[in-house]
Image (spheres, grey):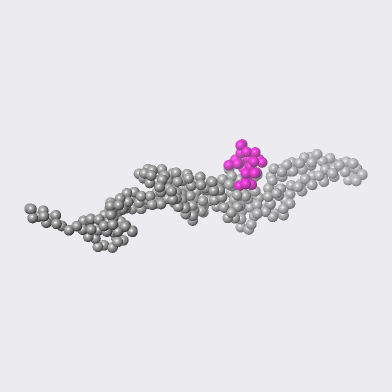
Amino acid sequence: MQNKINKNKSKKRILSTCIQDDCGMQFESDSPEKRNLDVLKPFWKHYCPKHRVRTGTRRILSVIIKREIDTDPDTSWLGEYSDKCTSEFSIDRMHSEDCIENDSIQKDKLGRIAGAIENDTPVCDEEPNFDCDRCKEEQAYKDAREQVQELAECDCGEHGDMRRGTYRYFNPSFNYVDKNGHASDENTAEEVRKYVRQGYERMESLNSGQWCFLSINAEAKVSIPCGESSVESTVGLNWCSGYESDMGKSGMEEVEADHLSELRKELKALGFSSRAISQAFKNVEREEN
Protein backbone atom coordinates (compact mmCIF):
# COMPACT_ATOMS: atom_id res chain seq x y z
CA MET A 1 0.00 0.00 0.00
CA GLN A 2 2.80 2.40 0.92
CA ASN A 3 4.56 1.76 -2.38
CA LYS A 4 1.30 2.52 -4.30
CA ILE A 5 0.84 5.85 -2.55
CA ASN A 6 4.39 6.90 -3.29
CA LYS A 7 3.89 5.94 -6.92
CA ASN A 8 0.82 8.20 -7.23
CA LYS A 9 2.57 11.13 -5.61
CA SER A 10 5.37 10.93 -8.12
CA LYS A 11 2.98 11.10 -11.11
CA LYS A 12 4.07 13.79 -13.59
CA ARG A 13 1.84 16.87 -14.02
CA ILE A 14 0.13 17.42 -17.42
CA LEU A 15 0.07 21.05 -18.62
CA SER A 16 -2.28 22.43 -21.25
CA THR A 17 -2.15 25.83 -22.98
CA CYS A 18 -5.20 28.10 -23.03
CA ILE A 19 -6.64 28.28 -26.54
CA GLN A 20 -8.14 31.75 -26.01
CA ASP A 21 -6.72 34.13 -28.63
CA ASP A 22 -3.49 35.89 -27.49
CA CYS A 23 -3.54 34.18 -24.08
CA GLY A 24 -1.17 31.19 -24.08
CA MET A 25 -1.40 30.66 -20.31
CA GLN A 26 -0.56 27.12 -19.14
CA PHE A 27 -2.67 25.28 -16.60
CA GLU A 28 -3.00 21.73 -15.25
CA SER A 29 -5.37 19.43 -17.12
CA ASP A 30 -6.50 15.83 -16.87
CA SER A 31 -4.98 14.58 -20.09
CA PRO A 32 -3.01 15.83 -23.10
CA GLU A 33 -5.04 17.12 -26.03
CA LYS A 34 -4.01 16.65 -29.66
CA ARG A 35 -7.21 17.59 -31.51
CA ASN A 36 -7.44 20.55 -33.89
CA LEU A 37 -7.91 24.00 -32.31
CA ASP A 38 -11.21 24.67 -34.13
CA VAL A 39 -12.63 21.48 -32.65
CA LEU A 40 -11.65 22.48 -29.11
CA LYS A 41 -13.02 26.03 -29.07
CA PRO A 42 -16.58 25.25 -27.88
CA PHE A 43 -15.39 23.29 -24.81
CA TRP A 44 -14.75 25.22 -21.62
CA LYS A 45 -12.12 22.87 -20.16
CA HIS A 46 -9.58 23.89 -22.81
CA TYR A 47 -9.46 27.47 -21.51
CA CYS A 48 -7.44 28.79 -18.60
CA PRO A 49 -9.37 29.68 -15.39
CA LYS A 50 -9.50 33.34 -16.42
CA HIS A 51 -11.19 32.74 -19.76
CA ARG A 52 -13.11 29.69 -18.61
CA VAL A 53 -15.41 31.92 -16.60
CA ARG A 54 -16.33 33.92 -19.68
CA THR A 55 -17.10 30.82 -21.67
CA GLY A 56 -19.33 29.30 -19.01
CA THR A 57 -21.65 32.30 -18.41
CA ARG A 58 -24.37 34.07 -20.36
CA ARG A 59 -23.05 36.85 -22.57
CA ILE A 60 -24.64 39.58 -24.67
CA LEU A 61 -22.54 39.58 -27.82
CA SER A 62 -24.14 42.56 -29.58
CA VAL A 63 -27.15 44.87 -29.67
CA ILE A 64 -28.46 45.89 -33.08
CA ILE A 65 -31.11 48.30 -34.35
CA LYS A 66 -32.34 47.09 -37.73
CA ARG A 67 -34.30 49.09 -40.30
CA GLU A 68 -35.87 47.62 -43.42
CA ILE A 69 -38.08 49.13 -46.10
CA ASP A 70 -41.68 48.03 -45.65
CA THR A 71 -42.60 46.85 -49.14
CA ASP A 72 -46.27 46.22 -48.36
CA PRO A 73 -47.44 49.01 -46.02
CA ASP A 74 -51.04 49.74 -45.07
CA THR A 75 -51.77 53.18 -46.56
CA SER A 76 -55.57 53.09 -46.32
CA TRP A 77 -55.49 55.74 -43.58
CA LEU A 78 -54.21 58.20 -46.17
CA GLY A 79 -56.86 57.31 -48.77
CA GLU A 80 -57.12 54.92 -51.69
CA TYR A 81 -56.76 55.02 -55.46
CA SER A 82 -59.69 53.62 -57.43
CA ASP A 83 -61.38 53.65 -60.82
CA LYS A 84 -64.64 54.58 -59.06
CA CYS A 85 -65.58 57.77 -57.24
CA THR A 86 -66.92 56.91 -53.77
CA SER A 87 -67.34 60.36 -52.23
CA GLU A 88 -68.13 63.96 -53.01
CA PHE A 89 -64.64 64.64 -51.66
CA SER A 90 -62.86 62.24 -54.02
CA ILE A 91 -60.09 63.75 -56.14
CA ASP A 92 -60.52 63.34 -59.89
CA ARG A 93 -56.95 62.87 -61.08
CA MET A 94 -57.93 63.58 -64.67
CA HIS A 95 -58.29 67.24 -63.69
CA SER A 96 -55.83 69.66 -62.09
CA GLU A 97 -55.98 70.53 -58.41
CA ASP A 98 -57.56 73.97 -58.94
CA CYS A 99 -60.05 72.75 -61.55
CA ILE A 100 -63.70 73.16 -60.57
CA GLU A 101 -64.14 69.41 -61.08
CA ASN A 102 -62.09 68.93 -57.91
CA ASP A 103 -64.13 71.43 -55.89
CA SER A 104 -67.51 69.79 -55.52
CA ILE A 105 -68.64 72.37 -52.96
CA GLN A 106 -68.14 75.32 -55.32
CA LYS A 107 -69.45 73.32 -58.26
CA ASP A 108 -72.66 72.57 -56.33
CA LYS A 109 -73.02 76.24 -55.35
CA LEU A 110 -72.65 77.35 -58.95
CA GLY A 111 -75.21 74.75 -59.98
CA ARG A 112 -77.69 76.09 -57.45
CA ILE A 113 -77.05 79.67 -58.56
CA ALA A 114 -77.63 78.74 -62.20
CA GLY A 115 -80.86 76.94 -61.23
CA ALA A 116 -82.08 79.96 -59.25
CA ILE A 117 -81.40 82.28 -62.18
CA GLU A 118 -83.29 79.97 -64.49
CA ASN A 119 -86.28 79.84 -62.12
CA ASP A 120 -86.38 83.65 -61.83
CA THR A 121 -85.91 84.34 -65.53
CA PRO A 122 -88.80 86.52 -66.79
CA VAL A 123 -90.57 85.32 -69.93
CA CYS A 124 -91.95 87.71 -72.53
CA ASP A 125 -95.16 86.49 -74.17
CA GLU A 126 -94.64 88.71 -77.21
CA GLU A 127 -92.48 88.06 -80.25
CA PRO A 128 -88.78 88.71 -79.51
CA ASN A 129 -88.14 92.41 -79.91
CA PHE A 130 -84.95 94.27 -79.10
CA ASP A 131 -86.99 97.29 -78.16
CA CYS A 132 -89.00 95.30 -75.61
CA ASP A 133 -87.79 95.81 -72.05
CA ARG A 134 -89.20 92.44 -71.02
CA CYS A 135 -87.22 90.70 -73.79
CA LYS A 136 -84.05 92.53 -72.80
CA GLU A 137 -84.46 91.44 -69.18
CA GLU A 138 -85.08 87.84 -70.23
CA GLN A 139 -81.92 87.80 -72.37
CA ALA A 140 -79.86 89.28 -69.53
CA TYR A 141 -80.97 86.44 -67.25
CA LYS A 142 -80.09 83.86 -69.88
CA ASP A 143 -76.62 85.38 -70.39
CA ALA A 144 -75.99 85.38 -66.63
CA ARG A 145 -77.06 81.73 -66.32
CA GLU A 146 -74.72 80.68 -69.16
CA GLN A 147 -71.78 82.50 -67.56
CA VAL A 148 -72.40 80.74 -64.25
CA GLN A 149 -72.67 77.38 -66.01
CA GLU A 150 -69.35 78.02 -67.76
CA LEU A 151 -67.71 78.60 -64.38
CA ALA A 152 -68.91 75.14 -63.32
CA GLU A 153 -67.21 73.45 -66.28
CA CYS A 154 -63.64 72.10 -66.55
CA ASP A 155 -61.10 74.75 -67.48
CA CYS A 156 -57.90 72.67 -67.16
CA GLY A 157 -58.25 70.69 -70.37
CA GLU A 158 -58.11 67.46 -68.34
CA HIS A 159 -54.43 68.02 -67.56
CA GLY A 160 -54.31 66.43 -64.11
CA ASP A 161 -51.92 63.93 -62.49
CA MET A 162 -53.50 60.85 -64.04
CA ARG A 163 -51.17 58.84 -66.24
CA ARG A 164 -51.81 55.94 -68.54
CA GLY A 165 -52.52 52.75 -66.63
CA THR A 166 -53.24 54.50 -63.32
CA TYR A 167 -56.46 54.99 -61.38
CA ARG A 168 -58.59 58.05 -62.05
CA TYR A 169 -59.83 58.74 -58.52
CA PHE A 170 -58.31 59.13 -55.09
CA ASN A 171 -60.98 58.44 -52.48
CA PRO A 172 -60.87 59.74 -48.90
CA SER A 173 -60.04 57.66 -45.86
CA PHE A 174 -62.92 56.58 -43.65
CA ASN A 175 -61.20 58.57 -40.91
CA TYR A 176 -62.94 61.63 -42.41
CA VAL A 177 -66.07 60.39 -44.17
CA ASP A 178 -68.92 58.02 -43.37
CA LYS A 179 -69.90 54.91 -45.33
CA ASN A 180 -71.84 57.07 -47.79
CA GLY A 181 -68.85 59.30 -48.51
CA HIS A 182 -70.23 62.32 -46.65
CA ALA A 183 -68.23 64.31 -44.11
CA SER A 184 -68.23 62.63 -40.69
CA ASP A 185 -69.90 64.42 -37.81
CA GLU A 186 -66.63 65.64 -36.29
CA ASN A 187 -65.35 67.23 -39.53
CA THR A 188 -66.58 70.08 -41.69
CA ALA A 189 -66.63 69.80 -45.46
CA GLU A 190 -63.68 72.17 -45.75
CA GLU A 191 -61.67 70.13 -43.23
CA VAL A 192 -62.36 66.90 -45.12
CA ARG A 193 -61.31 68.51 -48.38
CA LYS A 194 -58.06 69.67 -46.78
CA TYR A 195 -57.33 66.25 -45.24
CA VAL A 196 -58.02 64.41 -48.50
CA ARG A 197 -55.71 66.76 -50.39
CA GLN A 198 -52.96 66.23 -47.79
CA GLY A 199 -53.42 62.46 -47.96
CA TYR A 200 -53.26 62.53 -51.75
CA GLU A 201 -50.08 64.62 -51.83
CA ARG A 202 -48.52 62.30 -49.28
CA MET A 203 -49.37 59.23 -51.37
CA GLU A 204 -48.03 60.85 -54.53
CA SER A 205 -44.70 61.65 -52.83
CA LEU A 206 -44.57 58.05 -51.51
CA ASN A 207 -45.11 56.68 -55.02
CA SER A 208 -42.40 58.95 -56.43
CA GLY A 209 -39.86 57.63 -53.90
CA GLN A 210 -39.46 60.81 -51.84
CA TRP A 211 -39.97 58.76 -48.66
CA CYS A 212 -40.93 55.23 -47.62
CA PHE A 213 -42.35 53.19 -44.75
CA LEU A 214 -39.89 51.41 -42.48
CA SER A 215 -39.96 48.31 -40.31
CA ILE A 216 -37.78 48.65 -37.21
CA ASN A 217 -36.53 46.12 -34.67
CA ALA A 218 -34.05 46.01 -31.79
CA GLU A 219 -32.38 42.66 -31.21
CA ALA A 220 -29.49 41.19 -29.26
CA LYS A 221 -27.15 38.34 -30.10
CA VAL A 222 -26.53 36.33 -26.95
CA SER A 223 -24.41 33.35 -25.94
CA ILE A 224 -26.04 30.81 -23.61
CA PRO A 225 -23.99 28.03 -21.90
CA CYS A 226 -25.06 24.53 -22.85
CA GLY A 227 -23.16 21.75 -21.11
CA GLU A 228 -19.47 22.08 -21.90
CA SER A 229 -20.19 24.44 -24.82
CA SER A 230 -22.47 27.38 -25.56
CA VAL A 231 -25.05 28.27 -28.17
CA GLU A 232 -25.77 31.63 -29.79
CA SER A 233 -29.31 32.93 -30.08
CA THR A 234 -31.20 36.10 -31.03
CA VAL A 235 -33.44 37.94 -28.58
CA GLY A 236 -35.99 40.55 -29.61
CA LEU A 237 -37.56 39.40 -32.88
CA ASN A 238 -40.43 41.90 -32.60
CA TRP A 239 -40.55 43.82 -35.87
CA CYS A 240 -42.86 46.86 -36.00
CA SER A 241 -43.87 48.46 -39.30
CA GLY A 242 -45.48 51.68 -40.48
CA TYR A 243 -42.77 54.16 -39.54
CA GLU A 244 -42.32 57.06 -41.98
CA SER A 245 -38.71 57.46 -43.12
CA ASP A 246 -38.89 61.27 -43.08
CA MET A 247 -40.16 61.54 -39.50
CA GLY A 248 -37.00 63.44 -38.57
CA LYS A 249 -34.00 62.67 -36.37
CA SER A 250 -35.75 63.24 -33.04
CA GLY A 251 -38.71 61.10 -34.08
CA MET A 252 -36.45 58.25 -35.18
CA GLU A 253 -34.43 58.43 -31.96
CA GLU A 254 -37.64 58.19 -29.93
CA VAL A 255 -38.78 55.12 -31.86
CA GLU A 256 -35.40 53.42 -31.42
CA ALA A 257 -35.39 54.23 -27.70
CA ASP A 258 -38.80 52.54 -27.31
CA HIS A 259 -37.56 49.39 -29.05
CA LEU A 260 -34.37 49.29 -26.99
CA SER A 261 -36.39 49.69 -23.81
CA GLU A 262 -38.48 46.63 -24.72
CA LEU A 263 -35.31 44.68 -25.52
CA ARG A 264 -33.88 45.53 -22.11
CA LYS A 265 -36.99 44.02 -20.48
CA GLU A 266 -36.64 40.82 -22.50
CA LEU A 267 -32.98 40.41 -21.60
CA LYS A 268 -33.73 41.06 -17.94
CA ALA A 269 -36.45 38.39 -18.02
CA LEU A 270 -33.92 35.91 -19.43
CA GLY A 271 -31.67 36.41 -16.42
CA PHE A 272 -29.08 38.88 -17.69
CA SER A 273 -27.87 41.33 -15.04
CA SER A 274 -28.56 45.06 -15.24
CA ARG A 275 -24.81 45.66 -15.39
CA ALA A 276 -24.33 43.30 -18.34
CA ILE A 277 -27.25 44.86 -20.18
CA SER A 278 -26.04 48.42 -19.61
CA GLN A 279 -22.56 47.49 -20.79
CA ALA A 280 -23.88 45.88 -23.97
CA PHE A 281 -26.11 48.87 -24.75
CA LYS A 282 -23.15 51.24 -24.80
CA ASN A 283 -22.29 50.05 -28.33
CA VAL A 284 -25.54 49.73 -30.23
CA GLU A 285 -24.97 48.77 -33.86
CA ARG A 286 -27.26 49.80 -36.74
CA GLU A 287 -28.15 47.94 -39.92
CA GLU A 288 -30.24 49.18 -42.83
CA ASN A 289 -31.57 47.09 -45.71
Residue 182 highlighted magenta (yes or no): yes
Q: Name the side, left or right, on which 101 lies relative to 274.
A: right
Q: Residue at x 56, y 50 (%)?
A: 246
Please identify the residue farthest to the right as the structure is shown: 131
Q: Residue at x 51, y 51 (%)?
A: 214
Q: Name the side, left or right, on which 19 lies relative to 178.
A: left
Q: Nearer the viewer, residue 47 or 69?
A: 47
In percent of width and height, residue 58 lies at 34, 49
Q: Nearer the viewer, residue 55 or 213?
A: 55
Total numbered labels:
0
Is residue 270 at least partly visible in the picture? Answer: no
Please identify the residue farthest to the top as the structure is shown: 185
Residue extent of the magenta highlight: 175-199
Q: Nearer the viewer, residue 247 or 4?
A: 4
In percent of width and height, residue 229 lies at 30, 54
Residue 236 highlighted magenta (yes or no): no
In percent of width and height, residue 21 lies at 33, 58
Q: Name the side, left or right, on which 285 lies relative to 131.
A: left
Q: Nearer the viewer, residue 107 or 99?
A: 99
In percent of width and height, residue 173 lies at 59, 44
Name the image quarter holding residue 15: bottom left
Is residue 184 at least partly visible in the picture? Answer: yes
Q: Residue at x 31, y 61 (%)?
A: 38
